[in-house]
Image (spheres, grey):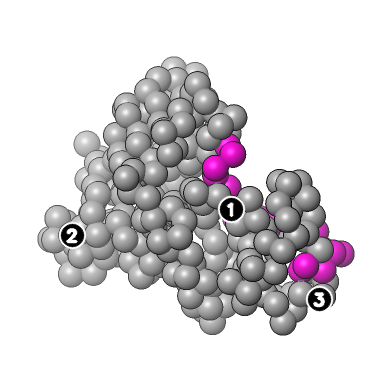
């Protein structure tokens, strides 16, 4: 079953087409990485999929709900963890999660389950502002999970973290796979290569390439994923 089905998705700003007739299907439970250089169209694509902006043409369905005609219903099953850590600094970890539970009408018991799932239980009573950057990012993701989304958008989840904190957060993200469909955007190519089931590379508003990291290396005839990404993104951008 596909969690996301995209059909001819298009977005124009001021007569300039920034996403050009995108077609893509993402199965339920997949961790899909959407990559591209700045201006490739990936951020606009994510905004359309998360119902933050309306497509100019085409459509996308999240678990069968159209982002154009059923945006309210689509929003009920998605969550976004933005690259800016979105926590209330003076509230404790538990209080941050309980606040989100109240907003979404979830029972508070759900917060304990999510804290256990993401390893936050030992610091439940600790104020969010006293956490390290990596643990604040972990809390931010946990807050996105309170609504029990079927589709989760992770926007640059490890941006600005040191190597150890990034690797720890990778372990958290791996635990979420299969339970939730995840769309990951990142500028860390090794992150996409290590975490994603499949990777899409956008350039000039179009999906230039799609496949596993190994498949993309074969497609680009390159030995490393970084070289493959550079080749695939640059070719389309230049054409």
Q: Number of numbered discs present?
A: 3
Residues at discs 1 and 2 in contact (Cβ within 8 Å): no
- Residue 53, placed above or below residue 39: above
Residues at discs 3 and 1 in contact (Cβ within 8 Å): no
Question: Hey, which quadrant is residue 75 in on the image?
Answer: top right
- Residue 133, placed above or below residue 99: below
Nearest to viewer (mark 3 / mark 2): 3
User: Would residue 218 be found to the left or right of residue 101 on screen?
Assistant: left
Q: Return the residue at label 3.
A: 126
Query: Which badge, 3 or 2, comes first in the chain's sequence?
Result: 3
Tell me the number on the disc at residue 148.
Answer: 1
**Residue 168 picture location, percent across and down:** 53, 78
* Residue in the picture at 52% in, 55% down: 154
Q: Which residues are magenta?
A: 75-94
- Neighbour class for label 3 at 10 Å: few (<14), some, many (≥20)? some
**Residue 237 picture location, percent across and down:** 29, 41
Give the spatial CA distance, label 3 vs label 2: 44 Å
Tell me the number on the disc at residue 202.
Answer: none
Residues at discs 3 and 2 in contact (Cβ within 8 Å): no
């Amino acid at each position: 079953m596909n969690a996301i089905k995209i059909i001819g998705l298009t977005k124009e700003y001021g007569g300039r087409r920034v996403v050009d007739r995108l077609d893509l299907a993402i199965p339920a439970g997949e961790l899909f990485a959407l990559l591209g250089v700045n201006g490739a169209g990936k951020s606009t694509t994510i905004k359309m999929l998360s119902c933050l902006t309306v497509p100019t043409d085409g459509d996308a369905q999240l678990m069968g709900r159209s982002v154009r005609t059923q945006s309210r219903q689509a929003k009920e099953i998605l969550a976004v963890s933005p690259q800016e850590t979105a926590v209330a600094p003076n509230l404790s970890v538990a209080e941050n999660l309980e606040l989100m539970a109240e907003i979404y009408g979830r029972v508070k018991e759900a917060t304990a389950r999510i804290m256990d799932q993401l390893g936050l239980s030992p610091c439940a009573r600790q104020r969010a502002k006293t956490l390290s950057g990596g643990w604040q990012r972990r809390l931010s993701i946990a807050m996105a999970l309170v609504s029990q989304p079927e589709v989760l958008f992770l926007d640059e989840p490890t941006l600005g973290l040191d190597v150890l904190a990034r690797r720890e957060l990778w372990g958290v993200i791996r635990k979420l796979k299969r339970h939730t469909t995840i769309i990951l955007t990142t500028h860390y190519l090794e992150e996409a290569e290590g975490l994603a089931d499949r990777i899409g590379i956008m350039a000039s508003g179009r999906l230039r390439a799609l496949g596993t990291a190994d498949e993309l290396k074969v497609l680009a005839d390159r030995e490393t994923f970084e070289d493959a990404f550079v080749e695939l993104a640059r070719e389309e951008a230049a054409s």
